[in-house]
Amino acid sequence: MSTVNHDYDEVLRRVLRAAADSVEPSADGLERIRARLSGPQLWSMASAAAWYSDVATRFMAWAVPFLQVSLTAFWSAVDRFRPMAGTSSARAAGDLAGCGHWPRWARRSSWSPPAHSRS
């Protein structure tokens, strides 16, 4: 450390010590601090953000696996009850696609399973 910085540090230390020594704590100072701490707690933006972050993390910890299992079960059921290609029920499903039960944009000329279920 250079002598210039050392002298500055000493001067600053003496000034701060003199300022701190001149402060006299009041007799009821501790009671005022306790009264301030025991009052209703105000929510700051930081505490609200921390609470939301904690809740969102806990929710996602169980929601993601739950949704994965639910979607797997749903698509398994869809695949289980989907008509097989070449059967009479598949032909009937193909006939339904052109008879107005589906929106025009979803109609197909002949029924075929979606790409994700083809083997």
Image (cartoon, helix red, strand yellow):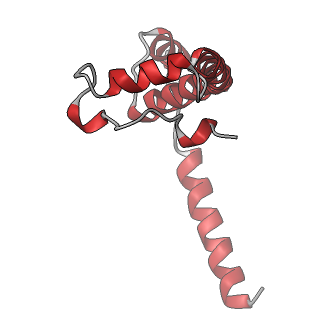
Q: Foreground residue, 117 or 70?
A: 117
Q: Considering the image in quadrants, where does the N terminus appear?
A: bottom right
Where does the image place residue 8, in percent across and percent down from the top left? 62, 79
Percent of width and height locating residue 77: 62, 15
Q: Quadrant of residue 97?
A: top left
Say which of 53 and 110 sits in front: 110
Note whether 17 is above or below 14 in the view shown: above
Q: Position of residue 64 (x, y in %)?
A: 63, 27
- The image quarter in which residue 61 lies: top right
Q: Is residue 77 visible?
A: yes
Left or right: 35, with 84 as reference point: left
Vertically, is 11 above or below 22? Answer: below
The residue lying toward the viewer, choosing from 83 and 10, is 83
Q: Residue at coordinates 25% horizontally, 38% vertically from top-left? A: 105
**Residue at point 36%, 23% (across, down):** 95
Residue lying at the far right in this picture: please name it. Answer: 1
Closer to the camera in the image, 62 or 31: 62
Whether residue 109 sits left or right of residue 20 in the image: it is left
Against 107, is 74 above or below?
above
The structure residue drawn at horizontal position 74% and vertical position 90%, both measured from the top left corner, is 2
Tally of numbered discs: 0
Q: If the image is split into quadrants, where does the C terminus sit?
A: top right
Q: Is residue 25 visible?
A: no
Percent x, y of residue 35: 47, 11
Q: Residue at x 53, y 45 (%)?
A: 22
